[in-house]
Amino acid sequence: VHRSYIVALSWIDSIRTNRIHLGDTIIPVGDSYADALHRVIATRHMT
């Protein structure tokens, strides 16, 4: 999601346009990672 972070999908509470919420923690989503993140999330919801 960002060069400085690795996030387990199971810990994600919500996703906004450019950030991920993990409880009280907000992690930015870099522009270069946003499309890939949304593809992974969409794939996970389909299976």
Image: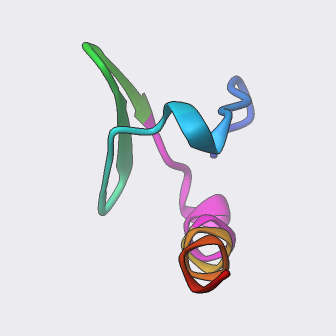
Task: Say above or below: 39 vs 25.
Answer: below
Residue 18, placed above or below residue 40: above
Seen as rendered, the residue at the extreme bottom is: 46
Magenta stretch secondary structure, dominant: helix
Q: Is residue 34 magenta?
A: yes
- The quarter holding residue 9 reads top right
Q: Residue furthest front?
A: 47
- Where residue 24 appears, as percent x and y from the top left, is 25, 13
Number of numbered discs overlaid on the protein picture: 0
Query: Given the current orientation, which residue lies at the most extreme top position?
Result: 24
Q: Position of residue 8 (x, y in %)?
A: 68, 34
30, 13: nearer the viewer: 13
Figure check: 4 above or below 30: above
Whether residue 45 sits left or right of residue 1 in the image: it is left
| Residue 21, quarter of picture | top left
In this picture, is 19 found above or below 23?
below
Seen at 54% across and 76% down, the residue is: 45
What residue is at 74 percent from the left and 35 percent from the top? 3
Color theme of the render: rainbow
Position of the C terminus by quadrant:
bottom right
- Where's residue 39, x and y in %? 64, 80
Image coords of residue 13 (percent x, y) = 34, 38
**Region rendered in magenta:** 28-37
User: What residue is shown at x 50% (from left), y 48% (from top)?
Assistant: 29
